[in-house]
Image: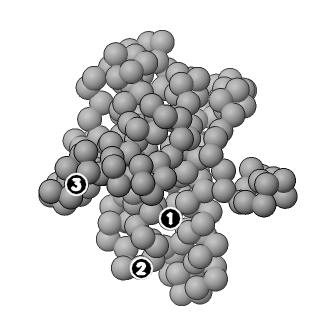
Amino acid sequence: GERISRQIHHGSNSFGKVDGGRILGYLHSHSDDGLQVWWKASLESAMVFLHSKISSTPDESFRCHQMARDIWAMWTHTFASKRASECILLTHDKAACLERATWMIKQMKPYLSKLQSAREGLDRNEVIQAYFNQVPAMIAAQCRELANVTSVDPVKLLKLRGLDKKMYENIAKPHGEDMIRRKRAADTARSRDILKRAGAFD
């Protein structure tokens, strides 16, 4: 809906924010399983473009990849929002925050593995895999910032090793933390500066 609205009113189909109040309202209206349904649906939706019947059809593959990109861009904006993060991560309770964040990141592991082993070119520019690294980094950062919970470690929870670990530490983590500080995604120039400061070009 946001993408269509911006195309009509602004001539661009990009979007760059979420409504923390609406997220809060949704979670409060589905207190028992709302987040689980939302999170698991997001994870499954990110895999549609990998399905053999979809990936063999370029137009369908492109549309499904765009859908996944929109969904996970939304999650980065969600965790850039203090209000949304407080609600989702239960930051008023340290134990609950740790449990919630750990559950969310662990749920991502098998899906990230599918992305890592996907046929080259299916995940265009590896953008969905990048989101699957950046979102855990933002979850961990908000746990530290809002609940003083420092034990959420995406590297361990996602079992990242070698190049995958380096990509998380040098690319995903600094981008996620920068987005939380600035409340918006980095443009190309900002991204290069973040990578330079993180030592990604060393």
Q: Is residue 34 depicted above or below 44 in this figure?
A: above
3D distance between C-alphas at marks 1 and 2:
14 Å
Q: Earlier in the sequence, mark 1 or mark 2?
A: 1
The image quadrant where one finds the C terminus is bottom left
> Where residue 93 appears, x then y in whole percent?
44, 12
Circle 2 packing at 10 Å, graded few (<14), some (14-19), many (20+), is few
User: Can you identify the residue that label 3 sits on?
Assistant: 200
Q: Amino acid at mark 3?
A: Ala
Callout in the foreground (2, 3): 3
Q: Residue drawn 66% across and 26% down?
A: 24
Q: CA distance from mark 2 to mark 3?
A: 23 Å
Considering only order in the chain, which callout, 3 or 1, is on the residue closer to the N terminus? 1
| Secondary structure beneath label 2 | loop
**Residue linked to disc 1:** 47
Q: Nearer the viewer, residue 99 or 82?
A: 82
Along the line of sight, which residue is nearer the eye, 82 or 31? 82
- Kind of residue indicated by mark 1: Met
User: What x and y, as percent, mark residue 146?
Assistant: 43, 18
**Residue at which label 2 appears:** 121
Q: Quadrant of residue 156?
A: top left
Image height of 69 relative to 118, above or below: above
Horizontal and vertical percent for residue 91? 46, 18
Question: Residue drawn 65% across and 29% down?
Answer: 20
Circles 2 and 3 in contact, beta carbons < 8 Å: no
Which mark is first along the chain, 3 or 2?
2
> Element at badge 1?
loop
Label 2 sits on what residue type? Gly
